[in-house]
Amino acid sequence: MGQDESIKKKVEDLAHQSLDLLYDYLRLPSVSAQHLKIPETVAYVKKIVNEYGGETRVLDDLGGHPVIYAFFSAGKNGDASKTLLFYNHYDVQPPDPLDEWESDPFEPRLENGILYARGTADNKGSLMQRLVAIKYLRENGGLPCNVKFLIEGEEESGSRHLEPYLQKYKDLFRADACIWEFGSKDDQERVQLYAGVKGSSYFELSVKTADIDIHSSLAACIDNPAWRLVQALATMKSQQNTILVDDFFDEIQEPDEETKEAVRALPLDKASLSKLYGLKRPLITDVRGEDPMEALMFHPTMTICGMISGYTGEGTKTVLPKEAKVKLDCRTVPGQTGEHLYKCIKRHLERYGFSDVKVELIDAQKAYRSDIKHPFVQLVKKTAAEAYQSEVLLYPNSEGTGPMYIFNQYLGLPIVSTGVGWAQSKAHAPNESIRIQDYIDGVLHMVYLLQAFPEIK
Amino acid sequence: MGQDESIKKKVEDLAHQSLDLLYDYLRLPSVSAQHLKIPETVAYVKKIVNEYGGETRVLDDLGGHPVIYAFFSAGKNGDASKTLLFYNHYDVQPPDPLDEWESDPFEPRLENGILYARGTADNKGSLMQRLVAIKYLRENGGLPCNVKFLIEGEEESGSRHLEPYLQKYKDLFRADACIWEFGSKDDQERVQLYAGVKGSSYFELSVKTADIDIHSSLAACIDNPAWRLVQALATMKSQQNTILVDDFFDEIQEPDEETKEAVRALPLDKASLSKLYGLKRPLITDVRGEDPMEALMFHPTMTICGMISGYTGEGTKTVLPKEAKVKLDCRTVPGQTGEHLYKCIKRHLERYGFSDVKVELIDAQKAYRSDIKHPFVQLVKKTAAEAYQSEVLLYPNSEGTGPMYIFNQYLGLPIVSTGVGWAQSKAHAPNESIRIQDYIDGVLHMVYLLQAFPEIK
């Protein structure tokens, strides 16, 4: 057995031995939206970190679910001047709709090498996997550097309390680089890494024209909030899906040439996208003659996530509603801020005669992109290729959102996201799962990464 | 005591004696939308008609809730060649929202001369009132003419099965004129009569872009059904509330000069309308420089009664919805048909590039107006003034809708609507009520009307 084979064998054994701890972790229904079993889950995470030789500190002085700090010091042959930070979360999405699960979402089920339970992919498997890598290194020559964890409990609820913790405890979490929480293999078994995230500015627009619902026979003289909202919205985006809000694009920082180049190299299988969702219409980007991957990575969006007014049940009700509401999710790119977009939308509506449309900024997270040329980013990619023995795709950013921006703001470090998922992981959906082989390969990836990490300048 | 005073005294006594029967009628929760207690209510109506000396026939061979035919023959001094038809319904609106009722909606409560219960104003009080008038006449010289009733059980659900009954049983219901089911005194104690109704064509428009909801991060390349619907709707009505659908107004039959004149004479208290509903915006008609009463009577509308897409709960959900729907109620005027409007809307959407918007005509009732110069219409007005000793307002049509058109189509008779309501009756809303004095006055109105009816040429 060569050195590589020996490492792989030991990693595999440790990974299998860790499954009992992972199962108990998965059995805790730590749904942040419902504040379920939060203290129990925090205690459990402390317990496993301690068992794996780390120290912990539970931070709960700034509201929200506690943030767990974990620390593993470099071994005596390691470089204690280097620190890698892992970001994870112990909370999970609600399991609804329950009736679509083939087994209890909070009772792990292993079948054909696939482990099913809420939180396997997002994000409990990933924490356990990282701890196994640390255990291996501690038992085989010692940790090559310090390792820290920030394990929060509100990621699935927008990480609303995270920023004050990062601000206050920035020295505690200080590190040289950060491995983010998510990532998966795609349907071609390629490993997907993300060097950034898009932002999201979430708005609610509402129009109220009366105190009570009115009989629709009076609509010949009384104004209709749903028509007002429709007319207002129609001025904000063209029929060709161009955002028409003035100054909306002002703050955008153009990606550099390397980043654009990297995106051009990324694959996107339009046919399988269309099939996966049962799309009835051509892709917007096809209609507009744009590259869909470029749009996903670099174009801000303005999505109607929800819209409601009046009677929405079966059949007819002849009502003139008193109000109408719409929820708008703007996926943003580096540079854009929720505050600016809020001002743009408000000013736009006033300019078009819709000052009666109330605008509210409900939530805003900024986009973030690490420099993909950074040696850390390249190291994560290189070690992934070695560990998974697969093609690795480095996305300059995910099309999704997370609190990366504030990590960089307070800690000033490069960030890359990688995780334990596969193409059918169904994070946020029923029958969430991971494959045990991916779990093992991911441990190996973290071992390789930590071994090489102190070399980075 | 003069003759008039003597009549009034007897009518008052009979009206009071009838209340126990009315109470039991109100106790039956005959909600047509939920098919509640329909056989029991039909049996009860038969019972009271029979007790008051009429014969009944229950028609149930054409689907839907049974239609009750009732007949009272002219007394021996009466004119059996003349027949007056009353239209009533035994079904009621659902009592929701239940928690806003100050007492059980199906347990009548009499307080300060006001009788509260679901169905008092709409439409059980009105049936009982008419039966009391018949009882008085039968006990005091005999009925001056034949009286028929059509009492249906689906008025609150759009009278969907009524037309085939009218068609098949047109000879059974044959009459010279018809008194419709609703009417009330306004907040100035003026009696409101209606010689017609507006029509209603109710549409559902929907857009489906995918089989399942999608993560909103993909909105940069996948189309959004809510935006499609918003853009489609925005082409159908201007920001100034002008309906922009081509040929929408084509079928309209202009009202004659007398009808226009009558509408100009009708009062509309804009300030109290605004206060009643807590309106936040100026009246459409004020913005457009139109007469609001003329608009209510003569202008077709296109109202968004309901609109839904995606996530409509609290806070945020980052979803790209799979579909979007809107419910449109077009209040129509004489001449307009649902079929034509359906074609116009469909053609309009295709013309503007929205052939993916599905259009469905859910329900259509045509508008109807009796000739306000007809002697029957004038007689109803004259006898109302005598009975109520109040000002009487004759509306060429209500701004609301009912199946008048098909009554005239199959029976060919003038129709006027009058009822037992008052300004605070709250038909369709919690704490529905009538005033006992209005109930008594309405009996007297029907007595006067029936007495004079045979004189009409």
Image: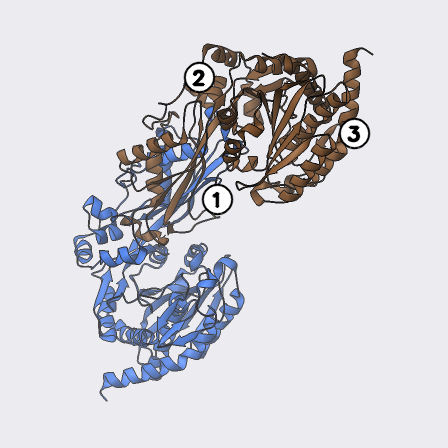
Chain colours: A blue, B brown
Tag 2 secondary structure: loop
In this rendering, would A2 be left or right of B127? left
Quadrant position of the N terminus of chain A in the picture: bottom left
Of A27 and A42, nearer the camera is A27
Mark 2 crowd level (few <14, some 14–19, many ≥20, 10 Å Cα): few
**Label 1 sits on residue:** A314
Q: Secondary structure at mark 1?
A: loop
Percent position of residue B244, x then y: 34, 27
Query: Splitting the image into 4 quarters, where does residue B109 fall?
Result: top right
Q: Chain of mark 2?
A: B
Residue lying at 37% horizontally and 81% vertically, measured from the top left: A16
Q: Residue drawn at (35%, 40%), measured in percent from left and top? A: B229
Disc nearest the viewer among 1 and 2: 1
* Residue type at numbered disc 1: Glu
Q: Which residue is label 3 attached to?
A: B17
Three-letter code, disc 3: Gln
Query: In the orientation shown, which residue stands out farthest toward the right?
Result: B1
Can you say whether A56 is above or below A254 in the image?
A: below
Vertical arrangement, residue A310 with respect to residue B128, above or below = below
Mark 2 highlights which residue?
B290
Q: Chain of mark 1?
A: A
Judge depth for marks 3 and 1 and give the one in front.
3
Q: Are marks 2 and 3 on the same chain?
A: yes
